[in-house]
Amino acid sequence: MIFAEPANNAPTPTHKNKKPIALLAVVATMAILPACSTISVNKQASAKTISAQRGNIVTDKKLSSDTASALLSAGLNEQACMQQFELCLTQLTDSMLNEHYRPALAIFAELQYAKARQLAASKDCRNALARPPLDPYYANAPLSDADAKTQQKRTDSCLVGYQENLFDAIKSSYTYLFYDSLEHDFEGADKETSRSRAQSRIPNDVDIQTQDIYNAASNDVITQLYQSADGSNKMMGNAKIEYLPTTASSSIRNSSEQAAIANRTPVNGQPTDQIKVMKMQIDDYNLNVYLPNENNYLKNANQQTSALADLVSTYELRLSGLNSISKRPGLGISLVASLDDRYTTTIRQLLVSSLSGRLNQEVNQQEVSNRSTDDSSNSSLDSDDASTRIYPTGHLLMTGLIKPAGDSVLDTLSSNQLDIHLYNPYRSESINILGDDYPLAANFSAGYGLWLAENQLNGVGYLNLITRQKEASLPKLFMLEPYDPNKRVIIMIHGLASSPATWVNLTNDIFNDDKLRNNYQVWQIFYPTNLPILENRYQIQKLINTTYQQTDPKGQNIASKNSVIISHSMGGIIARMMLSDENLVDDLDRLDEQNILSMNEKGKIRDALKQSFGQQELQERFKLEALPQVDTAVFLSSPFRGTDYADRWFTRALRRIVYLPVGLVKTVTDNLATLAIQGDLAQNPLGALYLQNGASQLSDKSSFIQLTKDISINKRITYHSIIANNDADITKGLAEMQPAGAKLDLSHEIVEDDASLSKTNNANELSSDEDKLPSKPLVAAVTVDGEIGQALTERLSDGIVPYTSAHLEGAASETVINGGHSIQENPQTILTLRRILHQQLQQ
């Protein structure tokens, strides 16, 4: 034998070959063994771990880790489970030997929603959305009768399966969420400990995932039910719809515009009551739809043509341009209902109106010239009904919630009745479910964002200033939420060449402050800034008075008291006149300081103005009367004493393209021209009050400013001034004089080089004055306490309005903001305004 050869210790060829092979085998075995391990450990970011734990079919379009694990433990494949869904659920139920009932509900809810989404994307269900063929010769030509019947049968079966799984997902997730409030009537239930578990239970990832499924399934049902009722979506096209009368008392029910503005309760009861307005039958399911007992919400239901308006889920909206999104966490789906009869304003509408006015001018010229002088004096300015320019919100906020019938676990899961409740989130903050109160979710920015996006307010504001129009575009009032008699009113008035869009950040921050949102409602004025300011004041005050009269004729509501006016620039000038009781007619004589006109001519001018507007209308235009509903005002950079900015060469050039409405000019000039006044009527100190545009009247040399610069505000009104200054060094100097009222600017990163840092450190070591402000950051705002020296006040300006023009004696507070004229957008301005509103609520 080879291995027994004693004569030679040298390896034989056989030995020589086996040793390397054995070594290689050992090395290979060692390399393979680690690969046979069933567990590998790697590190990953904690954010990724949390994301994986909280993701589910709603957020990641894949099953959650808990549901996927349950399928694996039962030996079930996800795709196979979706294909044989009922069998899969049965086998999954059998596999849950030690599973508690509540966690199983979360797993079933997710699987049911996943199945509904799969069916919705399938060809059979998508056939319900297919359009009829355009041409029978193309590939989408009509099917034969037999094929069409087969396809329709498959489509109907798919839709029913989709709907049932959607409803089952709602019932399973609802039962999971309110498990502890439901009676436990299933086998093996521990009825005595359910309540104690609810009190000690901490919300976990599964709770959040299951609420997402409940919300997503509810969202699909509510939005698709409306779309199907409207005929634009067939995923719920098999629904049988019945509209129900609201049984409103004829003495209360009112379909007029006044009812829409006042937003009264059409049915006897409270505004928060839920009114059943529609029934739907889908296969074996009965769905009932409820709306708030408010006119704005029930107006369509009263007509029994559509119980719901155009519904958009906030899940489908991406709002950009807002500084924040105002939300309230809670149960339900945030929706926006856009009403068909809502008012919109666009640049195209304005241009078409202007063009049509010019085209019709020649046609109507002969008819106008044939009218008598008395008839021609009654312009549309006097006869126009202000109530037609009050616009209730056309975008109603809603929170949708679906409640399956049943007080026990098994009754809820087997129920074929679903109640769909749509609430007004402004008035309904919570909902009682099975004896417990839960907060209602809301997105308060959604309706406001849609309104801003739909209305081209900024563009229309500019064009109103420079577009030549035959008739005046009169002021409008927009209510940003349905009228609430139990909330105070904030009236916002914009400035020159502007619009309500200027208040976007302030309004959104009010919505985002729950105390302000619960106690205030916002009305925004949109007015043409080309009109003479006296006329704008008259028209705006008439509009506001009409709104209060329409909403509360007796003036007894909270909404008719303690109102606040917030105004910017020209809007502040108008607001101050609406808070004064002076008679400007008594001061007309001082306009003619150079005695250009004789007493006889002055009298004729007054008579001509009376003829232009009528005796009563003239008094209302010149005799001021403070709004009784308002007790607080805030003025932002308002040029009460005018500005020389209006007389600079580039501003004068712009003023030349600002047109007065043709109708207004003709009404006044037809009467004044008969007086043979020397010179241009618009340059005459009295004629200029109505023949100069609003931009020209902001000049500190204008007749209007001379007439109104010293008017006083009613003593019962508390007013505040917020004034801008565009020189940071001057603002800093003011802050050093009054360090207690200074707010530092931390709105952006402060970048300093090493040299400046060294200087700052040395200065800090040498200085012991605690009141000394650091060189950086800049001063954002200063609350002024006491008088400011004349040397400083003459230098304070926002670049357009000087401090000396904006300052008001007797103001409850005065704040100087570092920035330009558009301080209404400044965060410090908004914060100051919020503080003022909070203070007003405490008074």
Image (cartoon, rainbow, N blue to C red):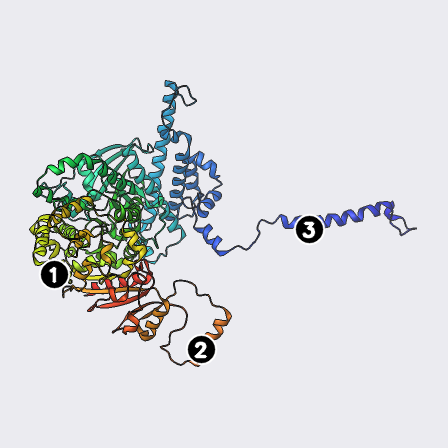
Nearest the eye: 29 or 78: 78
Disc 1 target residue: 589
Regarding residue 332, the answer to whether it shows in the image is no
The amino acid type of the residue labelled 2 equals Ala
Q: CA distance from mark 3 to mark 2?
A: 69 Å
Horizontal and vertical percent position of residue 551: 14, 50
Helix, strand or loop at label 1? It is: helix
Which type of secondary structure does the marked residue at label 3 adopt? helix
Residue density around tag 1, few if under 14, some if 14–19, many if 20 or more, within 10 Å: some
* Disc on the earlier residue, 3 or 2: 3
Q: Nearer the viewer, mark 3 or mark 2?
A: 2
The span from disc 1 to disc 3 (Cα, nearest Å) is 110 Å
Secondary structure at numbered mark 2: helix
Tag 1: amino acid: Asp
- Of residues 829 and 402, the one nearer the viewer is 829
Residue 175 visible, this angle: yes
* Position in image of residue 708 (x %, y %): 17, 61
Q: Disc 3 designates what residue?
A: 30
- Taking 248 as reference, is 781 left or right? right
- Quadrant location of residue 735? bottom left
Q: Is residue 467 above or below residue 731?
A: above
Instruction: State which tag comes first along the sequence, 1 or 2.
Output: 1
Give the amino acid type for the residue marked by disc 3 in the picture: Met
Q: Is residue 375 left or right of residue 52?
A: left
Mark carried by residue 763: 2
Q: Quadrant of the C terminus?
A: bottom left
